Image (cartoon, rainbow, N blue to C red):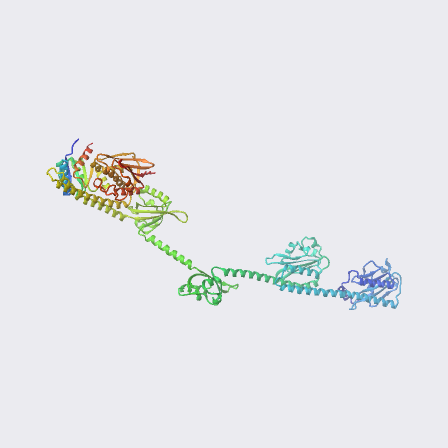
Amino acid sequence: MASLSKILYVEDDEDIRSIATMGLEMIGGLDVLPCSSGAEALLKAEGYAPDLFLLDVMMPDMDGPSTLEALRQLPTLLSTPAVFMTAKVQPQEVARYLSMGVLGVIPKPFDAMNLANQLQQLWSKAQE
Amino acid sequence: MITPSLPPNEGQRLSNLRDLNILDTGAEAGFDRLTRLASRLFNVPIALVSIIDENRQWFKSRQGLDTCETERDISFCGHTILGHEVMVVNDATLDSRFSDNPLVTGDLGIRFYAGAPLIDQDGCALGTLCIIDKKPRQLNKLEIETLRDIAELVMNEINNIKFRHKANELERRKKRSDLSARLMNLAVQSDFDVFRSSQYLLDQLLELTESVHGFAVGISLDNRIHALATTTAFDSSQSFFEKLIGLDKIVLSNNPRAEVAHLPDNDDIEHFSALLIIPILHEKKQLGVIGLAKSTGSYDSSHLDFLKPVIQLLVQLGINLELRLERSRDRKILARLSEVARQMPSGVVITDHERKIEWVNESFTRTTGYTLDEIKGQIPSNLLKGPETDRLVLNQIEAHLTRGESFEAELMSYTKSGSAYWNHLLCKPLIDANGVNSGYLTIETDVSEKKRSLDLLAERESLLRSLFELSPVGIALNDAKTGNYLEVNQAFTKSIQYSVDELKSLSYLDLTPKEYEPLEEVFLEKLKQHGRFGPYEKEYIRKDGTRYPVLLSAISLKDHKGRDLIWSIVEDISERKKIEKNQNDLISVISHELRTPLTSISGALQLISNSKDVEIPAKIIHLLEIAVKNTNKLSLLVSDILDISKLSAGELSINLQVHPIHHSLVSAVELNKALGQRKNVHIVLDSHVDGVEVLIDFHRLEQVLSNLISNAIKFSPHNSHINIDAEIVADRVKISVTDKGQGIPKSSHSQIFQKFFQVDPTDRRSTGGTGLGLSISRELIIRMNGHIGFDSQPGHGTTFWITLPVHHSD
């Protein structure tokens, strides 16, 4: 079973991006490529070759779902698993995200200490 | 033999003889005495009082002779009456006049005859007193005188007859005039009893005309014969009487059997010798008939003469009677009409042709306060008009009256005391028998009450109608059976875009999208059960095909024919829905905006605390812990805000549709997986409800299930699991969420579903939440026709369950 090590993380909010990255790196020991927008992610994604996309949903210009869609267009990344992170946890929205074939939805406010763990769990589950 | 010639005054003689009525009468003592005397005195075997009739001699009295009459031609007395002297025949055989007379030559063998003529006051010889012997004899002068004297005595007797007749006649006359007087008296009496008087009258007439049988019949107005008095012969002669209807001439017959054609077969009647029938006529009208009949004897003009005045009287009686009856009839009718007019609940006014009041009834006085005496001769319209009387209507009434037309009108009238009332008039001109207007009859009714009620009713009707028409909310009336629209208001037609007429040929089912059909069934059921349903949300399809959301409330009712109807309030909630959506969007945005900084703060603080790079002094760690704790508080506040708004949102509509229950379970579990993972609490789903459908609001049920599951997780110890079981019990889906937590103390059981209630409010950190979840969940479940409950024992965990009716789509 492959292990999770590289995360492509897209989040427009600076502070949240810092904290989440630190949490994943410091607590989870994961390698993270933080991007501030979907556009940046598209530029860097193929070069980085992540194991998992971690995407914020609410972003200007390109939101999480659109970013995911675009990323999946990239040939090497079309089956890369993804996880959404969002404060919008109203059920119909969650249902919508899940229907896009993501591993899960992590609600905001997230627990920075637990984030890596959550991703690991979702990753393991997907591997089964 | 020589037949006697006729005396010169034979005509008069015979006439006088007739008047005497002596012929063929019975023997009388007076005459017999004289013939006896003559016979004894002259010592002759035969003595006669002989009356010479036209062709015979008839013996009024005879001694010694059986026959009562002989032919005149062979009579001796026929010769005697030719002179005034006594005629003596000493020996008949020697007298050429009588020698071959059969009376001489025959068995009688008369030889001696002496006869004295009986001379009346006119000098007519009526007959003789004669003596006869069978041997010849002579009479001396003295004997002849004696014979003459006796003849005088006979004459006296004859005169007596005359006097007797006269006396009878006078008596008869007296009786007749008495009868007339009596009848006249009766005629003027007011209690004239036709029947009793008729009997009396008939009896009198019978006596006076020497009749044995008779009848008196009256003819009533309807041309029917009524027998007023009858003798036995006519007792059952109704059919005979009926033949007398129309008789206008007197019938006098002295041979009725032969002459009177219309005698019915009646033995008695057959034997009448004479019949007299007199119709009582007045101005060509037959009032009655009097009939008299004799078994012996006859009627003649004298009877008629007598009867004429009586008949006149009878006519008068008849007329009087009729008049009296008519008057009494008229009186009766008048009395009744007066009674009716008097007692009518409406006022009755009779005016003359100049419209002046002649009569008013009690009701009029009651209504207006005017008595007849006060207002006789006044004109009603002048009397009753007042300040608010419509002049236009008055003019119209005037016009009708001038044209002599009947009319109906309503007019404000005023009583004597000046109070106004609505007066309904019904007026008819009265035309007399000659076609001339003789006045007016007006019926006046106080309709103030009625008018008031009608006005009130109209006002009410108008008020309600304006409510209906102007209501900003759509209102519709439908036939419960067909669903067709019967009445709709503007608000509804505006939203739905169909016109009133178009809607009348549509049913609400035509306007409802298909997916609401199961809901419609529930709605109809509830409506039948409780008489009302709603409010509930659905959508209608507009004329242009677009949909819009509505909030519907309905009540069922019956019209006066017993037809089932539905009144529904159809509120177009498009605006509200928009606002709701905006609100929800706002909440989403807010929650995101609030949560984002919180995440950063919380995350940063935690990372600092866990930093392996730097050694952080205990004091700093403590400060960090404070910061983290408060950040969490803020986070919970945000949750509160969200929950409160959720609650308000929860009070908004419920959107029921059919879903498989399994989906709701699965998605609720998914939502809370992360939460469970944080504490390492597994969610175990044991579902036996595959394919089972429920009528629910999907996202709300998810909220409820999510709430129960998150509660279960919150109260579970770390590294445990919660069980979710779903099964069918009594046609309901039962979902149970069980945790292995502390359980709920008994004291808290009754408050579990209350807003903001938490078993241990101090222990927020581990439990989280604001205490709103269960109250929201309960409300939502109830709205979906479900139930919610729990079982819990301290120390043994808690099970929260919900039930929902299984939806059968048939």
Q: Where is residue B94? Give x, y as percent.
A: 88, 63
Q: Quadrant of the N terminus of chain B?
A: bottom right
Asked where in the image residue B284 lies, by quadrant, the reply is: bottom right
Tell me: B47 left or right of B483: right
Furthest toward the top, the residue is A1
Residue B312 appears in the figure: no
Tell me: B28 left or right of A86: right
Q: Where is residue B369? Give x, y as percent.
A: 45, 64
Placement of B663 over or under B161, stated as above or below:
above
Q: Compare residues B653 and B262 and report the one nearer the observer.
A: B653
Tell me: B515 left or right of B413: left
Q: Compare residues B19 and B33 and report the one nearer the observer.
A: B33
Asked where in the image residue B482 lies, by quadrant, the reply is: top left
Q: Where is residue B684? Give x, y as percent.
A: 25, 34
Asked where in the image residue B253 lies, by quadrant, the reply is: bottom right
Q: Quadrant of the C terminus of chain B?
A: top left
Residue B161 appears in the figure: yes
